[in-house]
Amino acid sequence: MNDQELPKQVVGLYSFPKSGNTWLRAIIAGATGMPMGAGVMQKYVTDTHYGRVMENPWAFNGTDWYFYKSHRKTLLEDDEGEPLTTNKVVYIYRHPLDVFVSYLNFVSGNVSPNAGKQLPFAFDRVEDLTPEQMETLFGIFLQHATLVPRNKAFGGVFEHVANFRNLREAGKPVHILRYEDLFEDFDGSVAEICGFLGLGEVDLAAVYRAADKRTKQNGKFFWKRQRENFRNYLSDEQVSRFVDRWGKEMAALGYETA
């Protein structure tokens, strides 16, 4: 982008699937002035499932930024065969039951049916699931804290968050935020992200507008940006069973268990 050699920063945006990474990517794009348009996010905030990290830097405030997204439960150490060093990590997590229902939407026939091939059955919409079908899928998540226990690279949601909390406690440059805090205090949460990354002063209102526009472009993929959406799909009894099984882990992440 520039003939002049700029200092480099490699920033990983990590999360368990369906925990808010799409929103986080859009925020980073807005905070660093990336243009709208098809392919911009993948080019400059690379989804590592579809491209290389160290390919297209984004020049901003005198630095070449390499932003990437990953759902892996551990830091990536290579970039399609080349060694990869991540300078900073921004990690986002979400109420695990909202992760569950958001993942159901993602693997539905209405959005990404191929992603749901490992589930016991196919369905078109979350709203179309019978109580028996919902219980079957909920039972998998209740036991494993993931709908795809065979995916060892991602693991379960609690293991995933714990790994990055442990990285931070070990002194690594990891900034952790909750989806719900971003929802309740967008400006404060984004200001903390920008401060952690050293992006300088940003127009928070403009970041919100840009991120909102980008996520709306994702349509059905993005689904419902709200807190405790799981209460619209799970019974109180199912929620209680999940709390009985995972209450200690939920409390450690700041979620009510009563």
Image: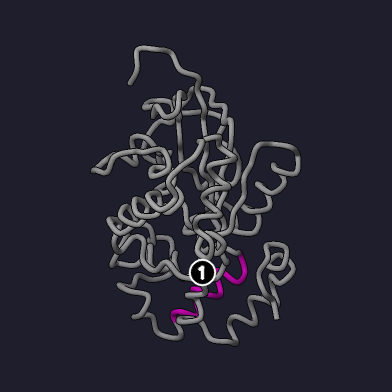
Q: Quadrant of the N terminus?
A: top left
Please name the residue shown 51% across and 81% down the image: 231
**Does the magenta run of residues contain 192?**
no
The relative height of residue 108 versus residue 29 in the rendered view (above or below) is below
**Location of mark 1 (residue):** 98
Percent of width and height locating residue 117: 38, 60
The relative height of residue 33 versus residue 205 in the rendered view (above or below) is above
Please name the residue shown 75% across and 39% down the image: 170
Please name the residue shown 39% across and 26% down the image: 59
Say what secondary structure mark 1 lies in.
Answer: helix
The relative height of residue 237 versus residue 179 in the rendered view (above or below) is below
**Does the magenta run of residues contain 143?**
yes
Percent of width and height locating residue 32: 41, 38
Specify whether 217 is left or right of 54. left
Percent of width and height locating residue 17: 49, 55
Q: Nearer the viewer, residue 240 or 167?
A: 167
Rendering colour mode:
one colour
Percent of width and height locating residue 243: 67, 76
Q: Nearer the viewer, residue 166 or 126?
A: 166
Q: Nearer the viewer, residue 118 or 17?
A: 17
Q: Quadrant of residue 140?
A: bottom right
Specify whether 175 is left or right of 39. right
Give the crowd class for mark 1: few <14, some 14-19, many >=20 residues within 10 Å: many
The residue positioned farthest toward the top in the image shown: 4
Task: State which region is magenta.
Answer: 133-144
Please name the residue shown 65% across and 37% down the image: 173
| Type of amino acid under label 1 | Asp
The secondary structure making up most of the magenta span is helix
Specify whether 239 is left or right of 40. right
Q: Quadrant of residue 258?
A: bottom right
Q: Nearer the viewer, residue 131 or 118?
A: 131
Q: Quadrant of residue 88?
A: top right
